[in-house]
Image (cartoon, helix red, strand yellow):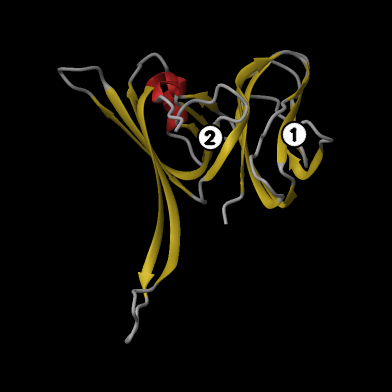
Amino acid sequence: MTFRHGRLAEVLHGTATTAVDLSPYLFSANLNAYQDTAEVSTFKSAYRSYIAGEAFTQFFGYGYYDPTLTAVRLSLQQSPGVVNYAPAGATAIGDQTRLLSFNTVDYKESPSTSKAVGFAWSINGTSPVGIGVSLHPLAAENPGTITGTGDGVQTSVAGTGLIAHLHVTAYSAGTQQFKLQDATTQGGAYTDIAGAAFTNMTSVGAQRLVVVGTVRQFVRCVATIATAACTYSVACARFPT
């Protein structure tokens, strides 16, 4: 067994106009995925039967309040948006990451006479959570073409559909381009995935990309950074079925 410590857990939050690494402000988090069911058992059945209903996802983050970081608090209250949650951290390509899309937010602050002021933040998902991997850990890159390699999406056969999230948390100038490529072997001949290019970034912000066509076994991110350094993260997951 290979267990991982949670101290390096990472939570990235973003909307069309914001992108923030919330990890330095959180001390605990919970991800919950639910699937409603309805019982349809009938007479003479040997076992109970159920049919699937609506699914939904919730994420809860608990942290400490810093009155000087108004941008972070404002970001927490914005929706809709996307969240990347890496329970054991996303420090390398291939680290496990959960991709959530949300449209409702609940933010609470809780002062106390015996401990630091805390806050609780929760979001409700609008689609199935993506169980995926990091294609580019959150880091700054200088101008140039950056090609991420490795087992981006670890599946043994090609499949249909892909979800990808881009978070740009620091930007100063230039037009930054991000796209995904796939191949049948690791380190093989990578080509662009149809429909898998993010809209060019000219500011901080986050995007969610949904690809509906066939995606081969191995996926990587290729970024073209222009003019000035840019800090970003990219993660992807096979589309849940």
Instruction: State the image coordinates of residue 21 (x, y, percent, origin top left).
Output: 50, 23
Instruction: State the image coordinates of residue 85 (x, y, percent, origin top left).
Output: 48, 33
Determine whether, in the image, residue 230 is placed left or right of residue 130.
right
**How many residues crowd mark 1 within 10 Å: few (<14), some (14–19), many (20+)?**
some
Q: Which residue is mark 1?
A: 186
Question: Can residue 166 be seen from the camera position used here?
Answer: no
How many angstroms separate mark 1 from mark 2 (CA)? Answer: 20 Å
Task: Say above or below: 209 vs 202.
Answer: below
The residue lying at 43 percent from left, 34 percent from top is: 77
Which sits earlier in the primary sequence, circle 1 or circle 2? Answer: 2
Number of the label disc, if any, that sits on residue 97: 2
Question: Can residue 11 be seen from the camera position used here?
Answer: yes
Number of the label disc, if any, that sits on residue 231: none
Determine whether, in the image, residue 188 is placed left or right of residue 159.
right
Name the image quarter holding the N terminus. Answer: top left
Q: Amino acid at mark 1?
A: Gln
Res 66 quadrant in image: top left
- Give the number of the mark in front: 1 or 2: 1
Task: Say above or below: 44 vs 188.
Answer: below
Determine whether, in the image, residue 212 is placed left or right of residue 134.
right
Instruction: State the image coordinates of residue 239 (x, y, percent, origin top left).
Output: 61, 50
Looking at the picture, tell me which residue is in the foreground, 186 or 100. 186
Instruction: State the image coordinates of residue 30 (x, y, percent, origin top left).
Output: 37, 37
Q: Amino acid at mark 2?
A: Thr
Task: Say above or below: 113 vs 105.
Answer: above
The residue lying at 49 percent from left, 44 percent from top is: 102
**How many residues crowd mark 2 within 10 Å: few (<14), some (14–19), many (20+)?**
many
Determine whether, in the image, residue 113 is placed left or right of residue 63.
left
Which residue of the protein is positioned furthest toward the left in this rendering?
Answer: 113
The residue lying at 55 percent from left, 28 percent from top is: 18
Name the image quarter holding the C terminus. Answer: bottom right
Which residue of the protein is positioned furthest toward the front in this rendering?
Answer: 1
